[in-house]
Image: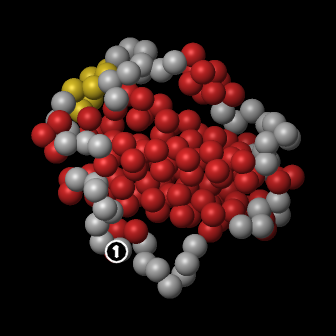
Amino acid sequence: MDKSKPEYWLRGKVENVPDLLQPAAHALLQSKEELRKYLTDFPSAKLWTKPAGRASVGFHLQHIAGVTNRLITYAKGEQLREAQLQYLKLEGEADASISVEELIIQAENELNAAVEFLKSQKPEDLTNSVEVGRKRIKSSLIGVLFHAAEHSQRHIGQMLVTISVIKDS
């Protein structure tokens, strides 16, 4: 992360994102940028370490990618496909064949896809109802999109704490 740059919300508008979705775009892009910042030189051998029984860095990376993907699926008015359900089941399962870099790229790709989805939205559709989960709980399009953004930020914060504990141990 370029330390000379302010956080995304202080950099102005994200091109082609509707005004009402600018905060969501800023949060998603901030999450993407912070992945690289916090995981620079993170040891792959500690990817699945669970300090004090808490979630591993690997889980947080998989979860950021997975939840972002699932929420955008719901925002599109779709239900999850079998591959997405399988991914969900495997989130956090230690897998030594997966590198930190692969998980970063996967999360970055999903965060980028979410921002691209924001660009395709029309302000007049943001209050439309969408169904979330197998129970098809009603939410609004804007609610789902903002949750995707804040959820990614929440897990970046949790991951940062996990990283600091692991690096200091």
From the viewer's perspective, tell me whether residue 88 is left or right of residue 120: right
Residue furthest left in the image: 124
Q: Position of residue 26 (x, y in %)?
A: 37, 61
Q: Secondary structure at mark 1?
A: helix
Q: Residue at x 81, y 36 (%)?
A: 95
| Above or below: residue 9 compared with residue 107 | below
From the viewer's perspective, tell me whether residue 81 is left or right of residue 13: right
Residue 147 in which image quadrant: top left
**Quarter placement of the C terminus:** bottom right
Residue 162 in which image quadrant: bottom right
Q: Which residue is mark 1?
A: 10
- Dot 1 crowding, Cα within 10 Å, few <14, some 14–19, many 20+: few
Q: Residue at x 43, y 78 (%)?
A: 6
In this view, the residue in front, 46 or 113, is: 113
Q: How is the image coloured?
A: secondary structure
Q: Is residue 124 visible?
A: yes
At label 1, the amino acid type is Leu
Q: Position of residue 131 (x, y in %)?
A: 31, 22
**Quarter placement of the N terminus:** bottom right
Q: Residue at x 69, y 62 (%)?
A: 39
Q: Position of residue 31 (x, y in %)?
A: 50, 58
Residue furthest bottom in the image: 4
Q: Residue at x 55, y 78 (%)?
A: 2
Q: Is residue 56 visible?
A: no
